[in-house]
Amino acid sequence: MQSADPGSFASLKFCKGLVLPSLPYALDALEPHISRNTLAVHHGQHHAAYVERTRSLVKGSDLESASVADIVRYSVTQSDRGLFNAAAQAWNHEFYWQCLRPGGGGESHGAIAQMIEDGFGSCRHFSHEFVTLAGEQFGSGWIWLVLDGGRLRITATSNAGTPLVQLQVPLLAIDVWEHAYYLDYQHRRLDYVDALLTHLIDWDFANHNLGMASVAGAQATVERQLLPRRDLGA
Ligand SMILES: [Fe+2]
């Protein structure tokens, strides 16, 4: 795992006060592809637990006022696996919610559309590769579209793994932990991933992230891309 420059931590602000961020849409907004029940449990219990665990681990330390991204990177420098797992999951989930929107999915558009065509041949081939990697991922994890060295790549991380601590710019992510889909899809992970790519992925968010990458270095982009936290309900 390649860590970011610890010296860049100080100015970062992502999740002030280590609070559970509100969802950028209503609990039933992603139905029928993600049910209200799944979203309520996933956000209100799983994500909330990661935030609470992070808060408890940094309580009384200088990290209390740090952003989640700062804490994730700091945990890597300290080889603190427990803190990394909690904080990275908190960050990954906040990113994931922003990757979805009602009425999303389907053909990409904007600047990323050309990059997808260049990198994967077509959006359909991109989706096929994304779903295939989701099927190959053993156990819990995340499937990402990242900018890596100026090129798009589909990558997988296990458990709490995150491109945040690598020299990659995350553009999109889909949570493939069972808690993300089991209530709605049971064991059919690929159906869940395909449904999100077809109906929910927010290409505007991917373009937002890509746009920031065009004006900043990879790490600077990662630090800024979720700043300020997007309020998609506005
Ligand atoms: Fe999750």
Image: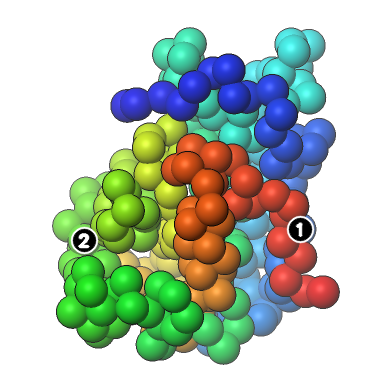
- Quarter of image, res 163: top left
* Label 1 CA crowd tier, 10 Å (few <14, some 14–19, many 20+): few
Q: Is residue 55 visible?
A: no
* Residue 143 against residue 84 in the figure, above or below: below
**Scheme of image coloration:** rainbow
Tag 2: amino acid: Leu
* Residue 36 against residue 9 in the figure, above or below: below
Residue drawn at x 66%, y 64% is 40
Element carrying mark 2: helix
In the image, the residue with mark 1 has its CB under 8 Å from the nearest atom of ligand 1: no
In which quadrant of the rendered image does the C terminus lie? bottom right
Q: What residue would you read off at disc 1?
A: 22
141 and 6: which is toward the camera: 6
Tag 1: amino acid: Ser
Disc 2, disc 1: CB below 8 Å?
no
222 and 87: which is toward the camera: 222
Across and down, in percent, residue 150 comes to: 32, 53
Q: What residue would you read off at disc 2?
A: 133
Across and down, in percent, residue 18 comes to: 75, 35
Element carrying mark 1: loop
Q: Is residue 199 visible?
A: yes
156 and 226: which is toward the camera: 226
| Disc with the residue nearer the chain's start (2 vs 1) | 1
* Residue 40 against residue 222 in the figure, above or below: below
Say whether residue 77 is left or right of residue 51: left
* Label 2 CA crowd tier, 10 Å (few <14, some 14–19, many 20+): some
Between the C-alphas of marks 2 and 1, the distance is: 29 Å
Residue drawn at x 49%, y 38% is 219
In which quadrant of the rendered image does the N terminus lie? top left
Across and down, in percent, residue 192 comes to: 37, 74
